[in-house]
Image: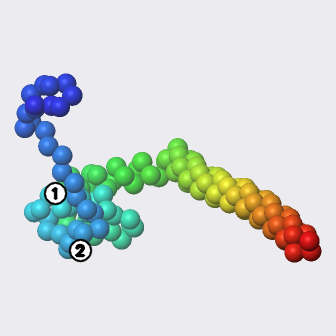
């Protein structure tokens, strides 16, 4: 039973999680799931070439489609925009942190100055009391 809507749940769909860095280095062409996971894990042209060497027809088509899409100018422009957005976000976060740090350093400096003034006042008052 689903908790919020109280509808019955079925076993028609399942989610599976795979940790790509933990995949074995060598895969067998018969294990189609591992072959597809290796495609998602591929980072270099060499990784794609290893998958092509398995001669799995679906994989050949997928790699060809990937190369076609990634070769288009529109794809490159989108990748450039994503990269710029990530860089801008990191820069903005860095600037925000720096500004926040500077703000709090100013607050601490003001508090330190106020405490120094109070210490001086206490010392002056003690001197007056000792002098009586």
Question: x%, y% of residue 17?
Answer: 22, 54
Question: At 25% from the left edge and 62% from the top edge, which residue is drawn?
Answer: 19
Disc nearer the start of the sequence (2/1):
2
- The answer to which of 132 and 71 lies nearer the viewer is 132
Residue beneath disc 1: 33
Quick one: label 1, few (<14), some, or many (20+) residues within 10 Å? Answer: few
Question: x%, y% of residue 115?
Answer: 77, 64
Q: Image check: 102 left or right of 37?
A: right
Total numbered labels: 2
Residue 65 lies, with reference to residue 3, above or below; the image says below
- The answer to which of 93 and 121 lies nearer the viewer is 121
Residue 107 lies, with reference to residue 10, above or below; the image says below
Question: At 17% from the left edge and 31% from the top edge, which residue is drawn?
Answer: 3
What is the secondary structure assignment of the residue under circle 1? helix
Question: x%, y% of residue 58?
Answer: 20, 52
Question: x%, y% of residue 78?
Answer: 53, 46
Residue 127 lies, with reference to residue 57, above or below; the image says below
Residue 100 lies, with reference to residue 23, above or below; the image says above
Question: At 67% from the left edge and 55% from the top edge, which residue is drawn?
Answer: 100
Q: To which quarter of the image does residue 40 belong?
A: bottom left
Q: Are marks 2 and 1 in contact (CB under 8 Å)?
A: no
Residue beneath disc 2: 25
Image quarter where the C terminus lies is bottom right
What is the secondary structure assignment of the residue under circle 2? loop
Visible residue check, residue 21: yes
Visible residue check, residue 52: no
Q: Image check: 90 left or right of 122?
A: left
């Amino acid at each position: 039973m689903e908790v919020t809507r109280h509808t019955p749940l079925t076993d028609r769909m399942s989610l599976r999680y795979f940790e790509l860095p933990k995949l074995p280095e060598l895969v067998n062409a018969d294990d189609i799931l591992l072959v597809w996971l290796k495609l998602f894990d591929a980072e270099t042209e060499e990784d794609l070439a290893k998958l092509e060497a398995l001669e799995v027809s679906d994989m050949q088509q997928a790699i060809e489609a990937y190369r076609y899409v990634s070769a288009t100018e529109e794809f490159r422009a989108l990748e450039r925009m994503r990269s710029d957005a990530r860089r801008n976000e990191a820069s903005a976060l860095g600037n925000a942190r720096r500004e926040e740090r500077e703000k709090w350093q100013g607050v601490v400096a003001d508090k330190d100055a106020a405490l120094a003034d109070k210490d001086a006042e206490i010392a002056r008052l003690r001197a007056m009391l000792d002098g009586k």
